[in-house]
Image (cartoon, helix red, strand yellow):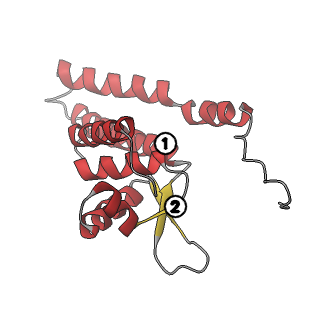
């Protein structure tokens, strides 16, 4: 594995800080960034070595990333280690998670609004209305994303070198 360049290191650190600001862990963001920059599956040990962190920390954060759908495990033939890649459908998974969270929030607001003493609370009504608007706007985004993705040409694969067959 080649050393990370300055731009790659900067991106990895920026993503770590982003994840931290969003309530995640800095190392989780750094792991995800490294995986976004790498085309091949990475083992826990490879991730730990490249990021100069403990394998235990990588393991904990990989499990968290798998739980939210950003990372998925893969196997490498002939190797017993666990390997991981970015989940190609991870962004849709995150969108569904965000939608589920907003739906839960609006249910709490609507339950409160059904109580006569709270029915005319302006801020409560505003929150519920915003969530309804947000969910209506979000409807169809995943479908439009899949259609957009399907319309793009497939990524080019490197040509086999002369004398070799594919």
Judging depth in this view, the residue of 22 and 111 nearest the camera is 22
Residue at point 31% right, 48% down? 30
- Quadrant of the rendered structure where residue 144 is? top right
Q: Does any portion of residue 37 appear in the rendered image?
A: yes
Q: Which one is closest to the eye, mark 1 or mark 2? A: 2
Could you tell which of marks 1 and 2 lies nearer the N-terminus?
A: 2
Tag 1 secondary structure: helix
Q: Which mark is residue 41?
A: 2
Residue extending furthest toward the left: 117
Res. 120 visible in picture: no
In-image side of 154 versus 25 (left or right): right
Q: Position of residue 129 (x, y in %)?
A: 33, 22
Instruction: Report whether 90 appears left or right of 128.
Output: right
Give the class, few, some or many, for how many residues have Cα within 10 Å of label 1's Cα (few <14, many ≥20): some
Residue at horizontal 49 percent and vertical 42 percent from the top: 91
What residue do we see at 29% from left, 34% from top? 110
Q: Quadrant of residue 104?
A: top left
**Mark 2 burial class by Cα count in 10 Å: few <14, some 14-19, many 20+:** some
Q: Nearer the viewer, residue 123 or 114?
A: 123
Residue 117 x, y percent position in the rendering: 13, 29
Q: Residue furthest front?
A: 163
The residue at which mark 1 appears reads as 91
The percent position of residue 14, horizontal first and vertical second, equals 29, 36
């Amino acid at each position: 594995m080649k050393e990370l360049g300055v731009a790659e290191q900067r991106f990895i650190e920026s993503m770590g800080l982003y994840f931290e600001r969003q309530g995640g862990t800095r190392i989780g963001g750094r792991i995800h960034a490294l995986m976004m920059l790498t085309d091949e599956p990475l083992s826990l040990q490879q991730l730990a070595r490249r990021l100069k962190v403990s394998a235990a920390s990588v393991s904990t954060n990989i499990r968290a990333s798998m739980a939210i759908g950003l990372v998925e495990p893969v196997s490498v033939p002939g190797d017993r280690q666990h390997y991981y890649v970015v989940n190609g459908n991870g962004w849709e998974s995150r969108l569904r998670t965000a939608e589920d969270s907003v739906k839960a929030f609006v249910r709490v607001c609507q339950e409160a609004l059904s109580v006569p003493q709270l029915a005319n609370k302006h801020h409560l009504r505003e929150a519920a209305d915003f969530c309804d608007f947000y969910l209506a706007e979000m409807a169809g985004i995943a479908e439009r994303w899949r259609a957009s993705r399907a319309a793009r040409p497939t990524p080019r694969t490197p040509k086999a070198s002369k004398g070799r067959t594919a």
